[in-house]
């Protein structure tokens, strides 16, 4: 990677991507970290580098009203020029099929001490619940839209939109909250 990067910089291949920190289209997007969306999502939305703030996490799940994803949305709205929020889930999402117990077993297999897991549980941390995804991508998008719309720090009048994208074709299906 470093060798490639050295050539990238020396050959000024970065020039087509030059932008500033303010989104040209004034939107912030919450979406999934799925690798299929890395280039597909911006193309399907007609976005180029610099058009949008894109926040990615597993499943596009907004799990806590004062967590880092919501903080990023609010920073984009208040400090970086975004005016609208778009939540984009996708079909065939791994978070819809995730088995928390299998993930926990893999943690142990890869060296997490079972005592650590026991300590977390006795401290009130429910790893199974924390790792649980969702049953319906549409319901997950609606949940995130509602959490954003009802956030006490959301600028009044902010439009919040929801979509589900097909990771095979890029087709967008609107989701109403």
Image (spheres, rainbow, N blue to C red):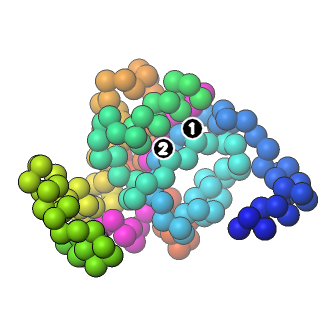
Q: Nearer the viewer, residue 4 or 161?
A: 4
Quarter of the image where one finds residue 2: bottom right
Q: Quadrant of the C terminus?
A: top left
Residue shown at 85% from the left, 50% from the top: 15
Q: Mark 1 touching mark 2, by CB under 8 A?
A: yes
Q: Residues within 10 Å of mark 2 (few under 14, many from 20)?
A: many
Residue shown at 89% from the left, 57% from the top: 10
The reply, left or right, for residue 136 in relation to residue 157 is: left
**Residue 95, above or below 82:** below
Residue 129 visible here? no
Q: In the drawing, what numbered circle is on residue 27? A: 1
Query: Total of numbered circles in the picture?
Result: 2
Q: Is residue 84 magenta?
A: yes
Q: Which residues are magenta?
A: 81-100
Residue 61 visible here? yes
Q: Nearer the viewer, residue 86 or 112?
A: 112
How far is mark 1 from mark 2, CA to CA?
Answer: 7 Å
Helix, strand or loop for disc 1:
strand
Q: Which residue is identified by label 2?
A: 86
Helix, strand or loop for disc 2:
strand
Residue 7 lies, in percent from the top left, at 85, 63
């Amino acid at each position: 990677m470093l060798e490639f990067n050295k050539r990238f910089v020396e050959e000024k291949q970065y020039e087509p991507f030059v932008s500033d920190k303010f989104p040209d289209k004034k939107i912030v997007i919450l979406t999934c970290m799925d690798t299929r969306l890395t280039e597909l999502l911006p193309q399907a939305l007609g976005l180029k580098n610099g058009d949008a703030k894109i926040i990615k996490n597993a499943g596009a799940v907004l799990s806590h009203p004062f967590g880092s994803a919501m903080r990023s949305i609010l920073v984009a709205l208040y400090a970086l020029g975004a005016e609208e929020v778009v939540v984009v889930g996708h079909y065939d999402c791994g978070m819809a099929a995730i088995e928390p117990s299998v993930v926990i077993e893999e943690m142990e297999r890869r060296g997490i001490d079972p005592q650590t897991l026991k300590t977390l549980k006795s401290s009130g941390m429910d790893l199974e619940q924390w790792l649980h995804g969702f049953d319906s991508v549409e319901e997950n998008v609606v949940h995130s839209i509602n959490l954003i719309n009802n956030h006490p720090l959301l600028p009044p009048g902010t439009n919040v939109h929801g979509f589900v994208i097909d990771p095979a074709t890029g087709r967008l299906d609107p989701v109403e909250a």
